Amino acid sequence: MNFYEAADSLSGPILQVHEWIQEAQDGKVALPHAMNIASLDSAGRPTSRMVLLKRISEEGFVFFTDYEGNKGKQISAFPHVALTFWWAKTNKQIRIEGECSKVSEKENDEYFSSRPRGSQISASVSLQSQELESYESLTQKSESFEKEHSNKTIERPERWGGFIVAPISIEFWIDQKNRLHKRELYLKSGTDWKKALLSP
C-alpha cells in the first residue's frame, strides 16, 4: 500500500502533489514522501515533527502513528493540522492545511500486516512519547516480544493506526533565481478548488 496506487484517480491540486513527490523520487531524493506535520497541544502551542505519507486519494493524505502518543492525542483533541513538503533538489515546497480523521480499521489492519516485521515489533513495544527508564529497557522489551512471537503473526495494537488529512488549502511554491518565487494557492470550495496566484 502506498501513495502511487491511487494516481490514476487523482485530479487537480491533489494530482499535482503526487506529481511533485514522483518528481522528487525520480530525482533520487531521500524519503521524497517525508512531510512535516504541525498540530496544537492542549495549551494552543504549535508542535511539529516529520512523518511519512503513505497514501494519497481524492479524500486526502494518509499517515500512520500511535493514537496514544503526543501527536495522536493532539490531533484527536484538535484535528486541524498543517503539512509541509520541501525538496532541496527540486527547489519546490508544498503547504497543506486540513482536518484529520481516523482511517478505517480495515485499512489499519491491511497496512500494519504489510509492514516489515521489525516495524510491527517496534509499534507493539514502543508506547510513543512515554518516558523510558532506559533505552536498554526498550531494546530488551523488543527482544522478549520477538522471542514470544517467534513464528506467530503479530496483531496490530489497537492504539496504532492512520489519520487522513482532508485538505482545505494546498499551496505550491517554486524557487526562482530572481527571488520572485512562484506561488499557487488552491482553496477548497465545496467539491471544487479555487486557484489564486500569490506574491512571494
Image (cartoon, rainbow, N blue to C red):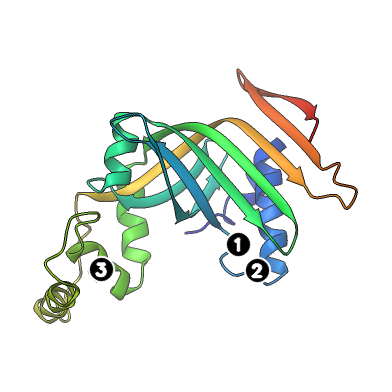
Q: Bin the neighbour count of mark 2 within 10 Å (Cα to Cα): few under 14, some 14-19, many 20 and up.
A: some
Q: Is residue 137 left or right of residue 86?
A: left
- Percent coordinates x, y for residue 109 in the rendering: 30, 54
Residue at 76 percent across and 34 percent down: it is 184
Q: Identity of the amino acid at label 1?
A: Pro
Judge whether 29 appears above or below 157 on screen.
Answer: below
Say which residue label 2 marks: 29
The picture quadrant where one finds residue 139 is: bottom left
Query: Under tag 2, what secondary structure?
Result: loop
The picture quadrant where one finds residue 194 is: top right
Say which residue label 1 marks: 32
Say which residue label 3 marks: 122
- Percent coordinates x, y for residue 179 in the rendering: 85, 46
Judge whether 12 appears above or below 146 on screen.
Answer: above
The reply to whether the C-beta atoms of the residues labelled 1 and 2 are less than 8 Å apart is yes
Viewer-closest of 68 and 107: 68
The reply to whether the C-beta atoms of the residues labelled 3 and 1 are less than 8 Å apart is no
